[in-house]
Every structure is written in C-alpha cells, then in structure tokens.
Amino acid sequence: MTSPGIRPRRMPLLATAGALLAACLLGASPSATAQESPAPVTEAATVVPVQTTGPADKRFNLVLLGDGYTAAELPAFRADVDKHLNVLWSTEPFASYRPYINVWAVEVPSAESGVDCDPALDSPRRDTPLNMGFWGGCNASSVQRLLTVDSGPATALADLVPGSVSANRQIVALANSDTYGGAGGTYATASGGNALSSLITPHEIGHSLGKLQDEYDYYARGVAGGTYSEGEPSSAHHTLLTEEQMKQQRAKWWRWLGEKSESGGVIGRYEGGLYSTKGVWRPSKHSIMKTLGYAFDQVEREVMVQKISAKVNLVQGHTPNTAAIGDDRTVWVDTLHPAGGELDVAWRLDGRPLHSAGDARTLDLRRLQLPRGTHTLTATVTDPTPYVRDPAIRSSSALTRTVSWTVDTALTTRPEPVPAAFTGHTDTKVPVGSATVVHADTTHPADRTLAVRWTLDGRPVTNPGNDRDLDLGALRLRPGTHTLTARIGGTHSTLSWTVDAAPAQATYALSKPLRTVHRPGRPVEYVYDGPFTMKLTSRDAQDGYVVTQFRVDGDGWQTYYGWPTDADAPYRFTPSGTVIDDLVHGKLGRTRAVPWDDATPDYGTHTIEYRTVDSAGNVSAPQRFLTTLLAPAAPVGG
C-alpha cells in the first residue's frame, strides 16, 4: 500500500493483503518508503562492525542505520543500537542463531536532530540523510505511527558493507525520536528512544524477514475489526480451521497443538487476527505479533528459524569435489555453529551409513580400507533444532545440506603441507554465556586429522561427538567466572575464552502496600487496595545492556520496558488495566490488550516473577513475590 502524495521507490512488499496493511502496532502499511533524497549520503558514512561472526557473503547481515542523529548525538545512536540488539538477542530464535548473523552499524551524522513530522503533521521537516518521517513521511492520509525511510539512501548505505547484498541482509533504520513508531516490510524501521522501541524491532523483523502477519483484531486503534470474510489465509499463523480439522488435515499448526506456548498459555485456537475481531483464528492468546514484549510462539518461531537459516549455508566449506579424490587422505566439512545447539553430520559411503564416523567433521578414508574402484561419499549436515517440527522445513536447504565426493582408489593424493592452526572460532574478546555452544574450526591437512582438545579451568573436558563444538550448557557450570581453552592436539595453537556463569541480578521496587505479609515457605506478599507500581532494575558484573523480564501467574514472559509514556517510570498494575493510545497496559491477572477485551478485574492473590537475560545470553533463575489486590467493599444499604 502506498499513501497518496508519496512518490515511492519500487520496493518488494510483503506477499499477502494483510501484511500490506500494517506493521507492528502501527495500523498502516509496512512499506517503509518515503520521498526521495537527491543528495548522496555515502561520503559522510562510517561502517562500524558491531558483531562479526564470519565473512559477510557467508552470513546473514543485519544492517542498522541511524537517522536524525547529529555528530554530537552519535553516542546516543550507539546506545540505542546496543539496547535494540540485546533485546533481539534475548528473543528466540535470534538467541540461538546469533552466530549466523553479522551486525553492522552505519553512522551518518545528520545536519539536524530528529526526523520529519515528529510528533505532528505541523511539526518541522528535518534535514536528515534518510528522510525518515512519521505520518508515512508527513502524509495527512497516513497515521502518526507509520515511520518511513527513503529507500534510495538506505540501500546506498547498506551497500557500503562489503559482501552485503539484498539477498543476505536485513536493513533496520532507527530514528532519533522518543515518539512511538515503526514499520516492517522490505526495510524495518523503529524509533530509537521510545520506551517500547526496542520491542518494535523484533516484531518488524518478523514482518520483514519472516513475512509474518499482524495478529491484531483491529486496523485503526480504538476501533474493533469486523468479521473476516475471505478464504483460508496463506499466513502460517492464521486459519479458519478448527483444531480437529487441523489434526485431520494435518494442516497449519497441528503439530504444535496443546504445547505450552512460548508466549504464554498453550498453542490452540484464539479468535482474532489479520485486523479482524471475528472469523479467523491464531495459535496463541498473545505473541510478539499481537502484543509487544512477548516471545514468538512456536508457530512463528519455526518460520523464523527457516527464514534466518535460509540466508546462510550450513556447509561453510569442504574438501574440493569438482574432481575425484583418492582414498589415501582425509575428507572434511566445515559447518555453521548455532549458539543454541550443534549441527549433525552424517557420513555415507555408497549409500550406507558410516556409523564409525559419528558426528565428526573430518573423515580419514584410509581407515575404511575401501575395495578397489570408485565409490560415492556423502556428508549430510542437518540442524536438529527442536524449534522445527515440519519435515518439509527440516529437509529444506535451510536446515539440510549434502556434499558428495567421488572416491577413486587408483588415485594418489599429492602431499601438500598444511600447518595446524585455528581458522574460525567463537569471539574470544567478549565473555560467553554458561549455556552457549562454543566452537573452534581448524585447518585441514590431507594426511592427518586434527583433534581439538578442550579444558575448563585447566581440567580436560569430556566432549562426546563433534570436537569442533563444546556445549557449555551440558557442563552445568557452577556460578562464577571460568576460563575455557581449546587446543589443537600436539601443537601450541590455543584459544581462550572467559565464561560468564553469573547471570545478571534483578531487583524490584514496589509502591507502598497496605501491608506486607511474611509466611514460612512462601514468597513475600504485598497487599494493595488499588493500583500499584513495580520498577525492575538489574546489575551485572560484565559490560552490556541487560534485558529484564517479568510474568504474572505463569503467563508468558514480557520484556520490562518501564511504562509506555516514560521508560524510566515504573510499570503500573491496575484491576482492569490502563488505556494509553487505545491500547491497554498493566492489567493484573488475565491480560487485556485492547479496550474491548474482557475488563473484569482480577482481584485476589497473584504471583509475579522476574528474571534477567544478560549480554552473554545467561538467563537468571526466576525470582518471585506475591501481590494481593483487595476488592472494593460492597456498598451497605441505609
């Protein structure tokens, strides 16, 4: 959808009608297109590598652009980038697949601070490199929250990243603004400094990368959507089918039905979505595509795993296979290395599994004692992630890759000395989390197999299977800081990491209660007779932004953001919630997202839990307290 009066550059948009309508809580087109900029911006730009996990042409590149930040305000842009990224890394599947992603920040000083039409149509136009603006680029026919970017300069800046092309990247443009806004489409946008802005970014990437649709039951805020009247949606997370029909037809999210939802409740069938209140159903009561701050549910997460993985190749390198090879050598494959688990490698010779090879990345053909002649050797790399249940996705090139060789026993391999050395590894300059999979790749001599030996605090670590990866989560490390090393056997080549096994700690501060109750064996209880506030703060021994989360009565974890009108203000719980900009925040007990949701007050006792996710990826054990909200006394007749 293009707003009247805007001359857009041609940009590929999302495929379905629903996705064309809106992005995030914006109630408008996700096409982040606005007026063209006549001036080039690349001369003043600086490309800053924020996270480098491999060559850009072999990675999914997340390119973050800033607009409306003057030279003096570039430190604020860097702080916004840090916050937005850490919230993204706290969100699955980005947490598990972070090693697939390079992150680049492109800094361009702006002549003026801020962006166009912020916050009103009569607000000034700003001289900025990317011409970002609210109201769909200052269009009276649009809505305030639609934050657009000029596609021309955005593309030119992203093209400054060597090896980055449209097929292997996602552009996210951050505006120097505290006003709520964003968009998702070919490009994703978000305001940099709003209380909710870092929660907008993963939602918009869900649109832009995952082609996920909004699960809102409204289009314009404050106006309930009507009844859905079209056919079965193409959206993976919307349907007209009943649960029984999904099971019988093996359709939509039938494999996930009944599972505890990552965003709270269970995967089932909840009415509303695609901007309609009735007649269409979604998998979860709330997820990140409906309410900011929650997780992607399993259905959405499966889609996102496929989309992220499709941007890369699981096989990063292998023994050349353009000609036959002899059986007097080793054969190897280098794979990617998810932080949340190890990839599997299965070797086959003439179609038969080579069980003796296990999950190794290098196979010594000399040990196989092959019969004379030619043979076919294959190595199949797969991602066994539990986040995927659809066999079609599992077998797709995103999650399965196979390499084949012809082995001819009559051939002799020419000796080529290759020194033993590490060629790639998990970043050693920053601490790694206690549940991370750490990796170390090596060179590949044809005449021998290099073994990687791991030690923790000076003691050898048992590492079954693939020796290039070490799953720290399986070691159940004691709290504190540890030293991990990887060494190539028989050499002095060594890598070393600091392992952060001490999650960040969170504390809470509540408004003054009527009374505080302490009972043996139970969390502390705070009693209120009306609204109360909660402020969560965190501290960590390591550098980096810490994400704090909370949940009520075992529902989905929400990222704590303060309060929509002020990130420094505490979160406010009320019996029926607080309506802000036609959305409802802070209802105690059963959630309420829009004014027409059930507003029945949930009085009584509730459990509030809180935890942290630090910059190394450590998730702290949940802490909890109880709150009791007293119902008003019944009126007494005279």
Image (spheres, rainbow, N blue to C red):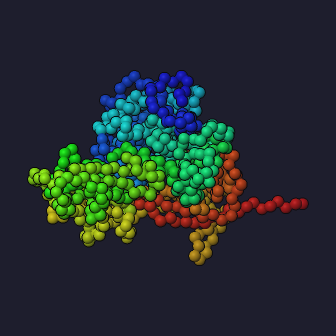
What is the quadrant of residue 442 in the picture?
bottom left
**Whole-percent x and y of residue 244?**
62, 54
For this rendering, which residue is in front, 102 or 137?
A: 102
Looking at the rendered structure, the number of numbered marks drawn on it comes to 0
Q: Residue furthest right?
A: 638
Residue 407 located left or right of residue 509: left
Return the x and y of residue 607 as percentages of the image width and height: 60, 64
The answer to whether 351 is drawn above or below residue 515 in the figure is above
The residue at the point 36 percent across, 54 percent down is: 382
- Foreground pick, 103 / 217: 217
Would residue 385 be seen by someone viewing this image from the given angle? yes
Horizontal relation, residue 237 to residue 404: left or right? right
Q: Which residue occupies 65% across, 67% down?
A: 515
Name the image quarter holding residue 591.
bottom right
- Between 520 and 255, the one lying in front of the other is 255
Q: Residue at x 58, y 33 (%)?
A: 143
Query: What residue is at 55 percent from the left and 51 percent from the top?
Result: 250
Q: Position of residue 628 (x, y in %)?
A: 66, 64
Nearest the eye: 520 or 345: 345
Residue 626 is left or right of residue 381, and the answer is right
Q: Indicate whether 40 appears above or below 100.
A: above
Residue 521 position by quadrant: bottom right
Q: In the rendered image, is residue 457 in sight?
A: no
Question: Where does the image place residue 523, in percent across and percent down from the top left?
Answer: 57, 70
**Image quarter (top left, top right, bottom left or bottom right) of the C terminus:** bottom right
Image quarter where the N terminus lies is: top right
